[in-house]
């Protein structure tokens, strides 16, 4: 039996965002009662909610969102169980020694959505994944680096390898123990984009 699991956080006014990013506001622009149709006005950043980072997010010389192959956003996935770590803990490379380069790597920390003291990928872990050829890495946290941060070594290692980073994934712990996982997290087709909210969905079974 195939099951689809939503890995996306709802987009709503006041939701947690990375420090310094635009706040999210969702409200009616048109209403059926007044205008004959309902249309929402959305104010949000390109990295609001569950989203992907393109390499361009880091450096103007790197590929933009619309220059990346669609294969970056869909494919077989494995979940790395990084639950139980303390606040601000680095996730080391030893957890990723078994990873196949042809999969999307999802890191489940189990921390609450929007928490700023979440665990994060160590520079060594990100470098191992990039060096092994992994080109899509996701995490259920605000960032693969600490929040906030003065430097972004995990972003540097992955994005300079032309990888995609997915952040703020929701409920990855539901995938732990599943042997067959396929993930889709297609971004909006934003010309010259540095990132985009996504509807991340996992197919299991």
Image (cartoon, helix red, strand yellow):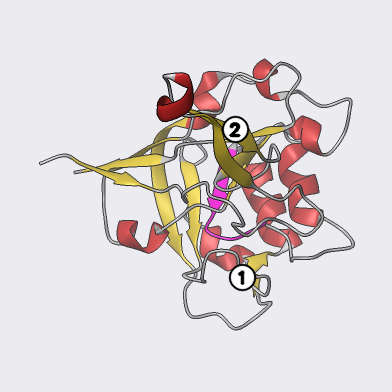
Which comes sooner in the sequence, label 1 or label 2? 2
Q: Residue furthest bottom?
A: 86
Q: CA distance from mark 1 to mark 2?
A: 27 Å
**Vertical side of 33 occupied by 128: above or below:** below
Q: Secondary structure at mark 1?
A: loop
Magenta stretch containing residue 6, yes or no?
no
- The stretch in magenta equals 136-143
Q: Residue furthest left?
A: 1
Residue at the (66%, 52%) spot, across then down: 128
Residue that label 1 marks: 115
What residue lies at 83% left-to-right and 64% top-to-bottom? 149
> Residue 41 has which mark?
2
Q: Is residue 72 above or below residue 120?
A: above
Query: Which one is closest to the eye, mark 1 or mark 2?
Result: 2
Q: How many marks?
A: 2
Residue 142 % position (x, y):
64, 58
Q: Is residue 141 magenta?
A: yes
In the picture, the quarter occupied by the N terminus is: top left
Q: Point out residue 130 in the picture as x, y percentages from the top left corner.
A: 67, 43
Q: Residue at x 47, y 29 (%)?
A: 31
Q: Can the viewer see residue 134?
A: no
Expressed as whole percent of the image width and height from the top left, the position of residue 178 reads: 26, 54
Instruction: Say left or right for 113 vs 18.
Output: left
Q: Residue at (48%, 21%) from the top-left corner?
A: 35
Q: Kindly state the secondary structure of the residue where label 2 is placed.
A: strand
Give the x, y percent position of residue 79: 41, 55
């Amino acid at each position: 039996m195939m099951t689809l699991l939503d890995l996306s956080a709802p987009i709503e006014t006041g939701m947690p965002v990375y420090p310094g990013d635009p706040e999210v506001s969702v409200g009616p622009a048109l209403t059926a009662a007044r205008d004959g149709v309902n249309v929402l006005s959305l104010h949000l950043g390109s990295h609001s909610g569950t989203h992907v980072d393109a390499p361009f997010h880091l450096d103007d010389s790197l590929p933009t969102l619309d220059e990346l192959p669609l294969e970056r956003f869909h494919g077989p996935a494995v979940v790395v169980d990084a639950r139980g770590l303390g606040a601000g803990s680095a996730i080391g490379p030893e957890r990723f020694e078994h990873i196949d380069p042809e999969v999307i790597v999802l890191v489940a920390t189990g921390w609450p959505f929007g928490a700023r003291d979440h665990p994060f990928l160590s520079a060594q872990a990100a470098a191992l994944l990039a060096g092994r050829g992994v080109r899509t890495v996701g995490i259920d946290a605000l960032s693969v680096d600490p929040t906030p941060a003065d430097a972004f070594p995990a972003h540097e290692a992955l994005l300079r390898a032309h990888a995609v980073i997915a952040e703020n994934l929701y409920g990855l712990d539901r995938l732990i123990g599943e042997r067959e996982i396929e993930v889709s997290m297609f971004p909006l087709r934003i010309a010259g984009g540095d990132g985009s909210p996504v509807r991340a969905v996992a197919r299991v079974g």
